[in-house]
Image (cartoon, rainbow, N blue to C red):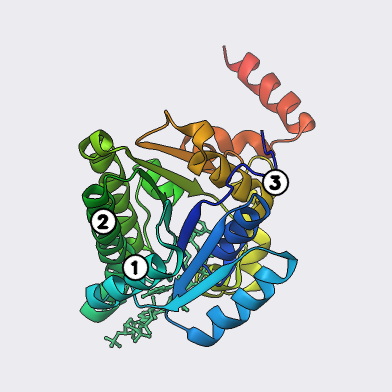
Amino acid sequence: MFIADLLKDKVIVITGGGTGLGRSLGERFLELGAKLAITSRREDVLQKAAEEMSQNGGEVFYVPCDVRDPEQVTKMVDAVWQHFGKIDVFVNNAAGNFISPTERLSSRAVDSVLNIVLHGTFYCTLEVGKRWIEAGQQGTFLNIVTTYAASSSGSGFVTPSAAAKAGVLSLTRSLAVEWAKYGIRHVAIAPGLFPTEGAWSRLVPTQEMADQIIHRVPMRRVGNKEELSNLAAYLISDQAAYINGEVVTIDGGEWIQGAGQFNELIDVTEEQWDQLAASIKKGK
Ligand code: HXC
Ligand code: NAP
């Protein structure tokens, strides 16, 4: 289904689009014919990314914006609208996160994550949604969440992120219903482990943690960015026009491995199973 013009002439905005997963999404959307706007706090990062991303053709416009500030969000959306004349898809991808025991967090640390993830997503959604409604234009929001939001498990040691992403998921589902009458669709993706500089430096800071992390995934590998980008391209395309309010998990089975009570038995060898079976049968 990934025909070359799947996203032809769609104007797509990606927050946090200059690095990591946001950049990978943008690169794939460009290949499929989209026009792109990327935004985040650091202008130098955006400028370099925009230059590199447009090398194979396609247009990449960039606007610096801190999504925690509603005035900057309004200006950013104004700038994109003025440049392209419309927005078709808005990807709420920008995030902040780091591991820490919760009792070590200051209120400012909590705010820094909640304000980027929950408030930032809300401000962007409100700003763009109001314009779509006023213009009578259809549109799609894609929100990037996490498996600990999608599975409703939450997660210790990243509690501001867990609370904020759960809020984003709730926003996704709430507006999927409320704004469907305007032709506005909401979808979300919950990625598992996709190594990026931004996430790994804050969440997997040691080699030992990096070596261990793969054991969380039954497929024993991390995800690759093309897999994520293809899923995103499908979800924002017209091919997925009837998908609304859904979150798609892409994690190689990671969260469900953690949830199953006996799933750690995956590491038991055949020999150990022979011994266990003998011992169980003897006991009956
Ligand atoms: C405890 C910390 C801390 C840490 C910062 N703080 N890092 N507290 N442990 N490791 C505290 C600071 O001391 C300060 O509080 C407050 O948080 C704000 O810190 P600043 O550095 O001033 O904030 P700011 O410059 O706004 O940066 C925001 C940030 C930073 C979230 C802290 O990490 C950032 O810019 N992140 C953006 C990119 C990112 O996080 N990418 C990863 C997304 S991955 P005090 O009280 O001292 O003033 C993701 C995926 C999850 O979400 C799933 C993966 C598998
Ligand atoms: P990343 O490269 O650190 O991406 C975060 C982006 O958000 C950066 O481009 C950053 O740019 C931007 N950003 C941060 N604060 C901002 C603010 N206040 N205003 C505007 N932009 C801001 O990490 P990533 O791994 O690609 O994460 C991308 C998304 O995937 C996030 O939503 C994350 O939660 C999600 N995710 C990732 C993984 C994974 O395994 N990597 C797993 C699950 C979910 P600036 O610093 O320039 O602002």
Q: Which numbered disc, 3 or 1, marks the residue that appears first in the sequence? A: 1
Name the residue: 51% across, 51% down: 10
Q: In this view of the protein, which residue sits in the foreground, 248 or 26? A: 26
According to the image, label 3 marks what residue? 220
Residue 46 appears left or right of 153: right
According to the image, label 1 marks what residue? 77
Q: Nearer the viewer, mark 3 or mark 1?
A: 1
Residue 77 appears left or right of 205: left
Helix, strand or loop at disc 2?
A: helix
Q: Please rate how many residues cluster around mark 3, counting C-alpha atoms within 10 Å: few if below 14, some from 14 to 19, many from 20.
A: few
Q: Disc 3 versus disc 2: distance between alpha carbons?
A: 44 Å
> Do tag 2 and tag 1 residues touch (Cβ < 8 Å)?
yes
Q: Which numbered disc, 2 or 1, marks the residue that appears first in the sequence? A: 1
Instruction: Tell me the quarter of the image containing the N terminus.
Output: top right
Name the residue: 58% across, 60% down: 26
Helix, strand or loop at disc 1?
A: helix
Residue 269 appears left or right of 194: right
* Residue 5 in picture, x, y percent from top left: 65, 44
Most extreme residue toward the bottom is 44
According to the image, label 2 marks what residue? 131
Q: Nearer the viewer, mark 3 or mark 2?
A: 2
Asked if one can make out residue 261 in the rendered structure from this viewpoint, the answer is: no
Amino acid under label 3? Answer: Arg
Name the residue: 39% across, 40% down: 151
Amino acid under label 1? Answer: Val
* Residue 48 in picture, x, y percent from top left: 62, 81
* Residue 262 in picture, x, y percent from top left: 53, 32
